Amino acid sequence: MEKVIAVVSGKGGVGKTLMATNLGVYLAEKGESVVIVDLNLQARGADLALGLASRVVYDLADALSGVCRLRQAAVKSKRFPGLAVIEPPLMKEHVNISPLEIQVLCEKLSQEYRHVILDMAPGAGEAFEGIVSLARRALVVTTQDPISVRACGRVIAAVEKRQVPEGRLLINQVRLSLTDRGFLPAVEEIAQELRLPLCGVLPYDDHIHVAFTNGNPVISRRDTPAGEHMEKILSCFMDPPESAGA
Ligand SMILES: Nc1ncnc2c1ncn2[C@@H]1O[C@H](COP(=O)(O)OP(=O)(O)OP(=O)(O)O)[C@@H](O)[C@H]1O
Ligand SMILES: [Mg+2]
């Protein structure tokens, strides 16, 4: 689907929600309508990262089961007009959302929003493939951790198998001092191993962590190094050099 963007990773905790929420704000600040669907059923977090946690009343399961309308489950940001987020349930047990349900959801959301960002749970598998096949773009996130890189290889294989037209790699939480001392693989090595076009390298930065945990996406502060860096990565992801101006 033209409007669907998936943010994916092999391993958890690598920065998918960080990137999905910053991408949402980046697009909303351009005046485009965007909805982030948080699909991490075990550890939802996009609401927190956007400072919207206290405003979530209805969730994705409520919308899918007809307890509420889809619009009621989409929490609109006042700070970033045009941006909304849909969260999975927090405390309900046995929630199982199928790829078909996500497909129908994306079709509906595509009628209302210019971009639909899927903030995925980590890992590959059958359900993952079904969902990622809906996407036109995929942002594949890894850290330098060898376990993350290896798991990322599996996810990239799934993204390629499902023929997502535009897949891009982000290497996150990069620690140059450890790399220089030989404790972590160089980003060039990782990019070569994973063979997916690189849209950026984001250093580990305490400012990013603090902003994330306080619900302040760094992209909204382009006057800071972290904000500036994030903007370059997101603009490269949305408008890669080879297609720029096309
Ligand atoms: N570049 C960075 N610098 C500092 N902290 C970072 C950076 N990227 C991510 N983090 C921190 O790493 C943690 C995990 O980030 P995030 O929740 O985005 O990962 P995730 O891939 O969505 O996790 P999950 O797989 O559980 O959904 C957060 O505490 C976040 O602040
Ligand atoms: Mg997440």
Image (cartoon, rainbow, N blue to C red):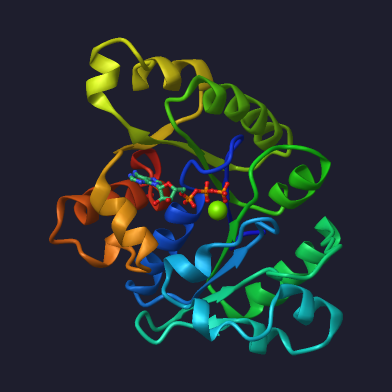
Q: Quadrant of residue 152?
A: top right
Q: Residue at x 60, y 62 (%)?
A: 44
Considering every residue shown, the one lying at the far left of the view is: 223
Front-most of residues 58 and 81? 58
Q: Is residue 14 above or below residue 16?
A: above
- x, y percent for residue 167: 54, 39
Q: In the visual, does 124 lie left or right of 66?
A: left
- Left or right, 240 with respect to 72, comes to left
- Relative to the observer, which residue lies in front, 45 or 3? 45
The quadrant of the rendering that contains the N terminus is bottom right
Residue 215 appears anywhere in the view = yes
* Rendered location of residue 61, percent (x, y): 78, 74
Asked if residue 206 is positioned above or below residue 74 in the image, the reply reads: above
Q: Residue at x 58, y 82 (%)?
A: 56
Relative placement, left or right, of 167 versus 71 is left
The residue depicted at 32 percent of the width and 46 percent of the height is: 233
In the rendered view, tell whether residue 73 sits above or below residue 181. Answer: below
Is residue 245 something that shows in the picture? no
x, y percent for residue 84: 52, 78
Residue 188 image-quadrant placement: top left
Q: Is residue 130 above or below residue 149?
A: below
Image point (64%, 72%), residue name: 110
Q: How many marks?
A: 0
149 vs 99, nearest the viewer: 149
Q: For the view shown, which residue lies furthest in the top direction?
A: 182
Q: Is residue 151 left or right of residue 195?
A: right
Q: Give percent across and percent down for residue 136.
A: 60, 51
